[in-house]
Image: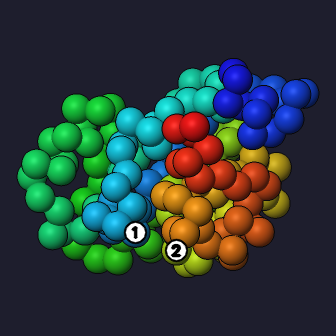
Amino acid sequence: MDLLRRLFGPGAAPSDRVALFVDGPNVLRDEFDVDLDDIREAARALGGQMSATRLYLDEHATPGLIQAAEARGFEVVVTSGDVDVRLAIDMTRYAIEGLADAIVIASRDTDFKPALEVANEYGIKTIALAPGSYGRSDALQNAATHAMTLDDVTE
């Protein structure tokens, strides 16, 4: 709750259902040194129940990464096609079907801007979670109702 109020203000109310979508190829890079537990903690800080905790990976993901993510409570979605397309479709579906009250997208890829805009149109709270201040996307930050970095979570 402290993180929720620190990021969104003193009157911030917890969301009932939070869906977390992680763009693995763009976030899990050596240059960012991202911990999946920190990503999950950022989404949980919004309160409520997790309606989705998904990590999207391409076909080149190592079995060790998949196993580690599953051990941390992530549903791993491995796709042979474009990770961005699958993630954006799933995120949009959660918005239009009312499966979440808040959607967190952990990415730095501007391809998710239209999906954030659709979620906003449906009254969903949207949070752009960047792997760090230097990994922040201005387009995602501006399209989401809120933006934060993993540095905000781990401080």
Q: Quadrant of the C terminus?
A: top right
Residue appearing at x 44%, y 54% in the figure: 22
| 9 with respect to 1 (left or right) | right
Residue 108 point in image, percent of width and height? 53, 69
| 34 with respect to 41 (left or right) | left
Q: Amino acid at mark 2?
A: Asp
- For the residue pair 62 and 84, the one nearer the viewer reads as 62
Find the distance from the CA under tag 2 to the CA under tag 1: 7 Å
User: Which residue position is annotated with label 1?
Assistant: 26
Q: Amino acid at mark 1?
A: Asn
Res. 136 image quadrant:
bottom right
Residue 94 visible to the viewer: no
How many numbered marks appear?
A: 2
User: Which residue position is annotated with label 2?
Assistant: 109
Res. 79 image quadrant:
bottom left
Residue 68 point in image, percent of width and height? 19, 40
Name the secondary structure under disc 1. Answer: helix
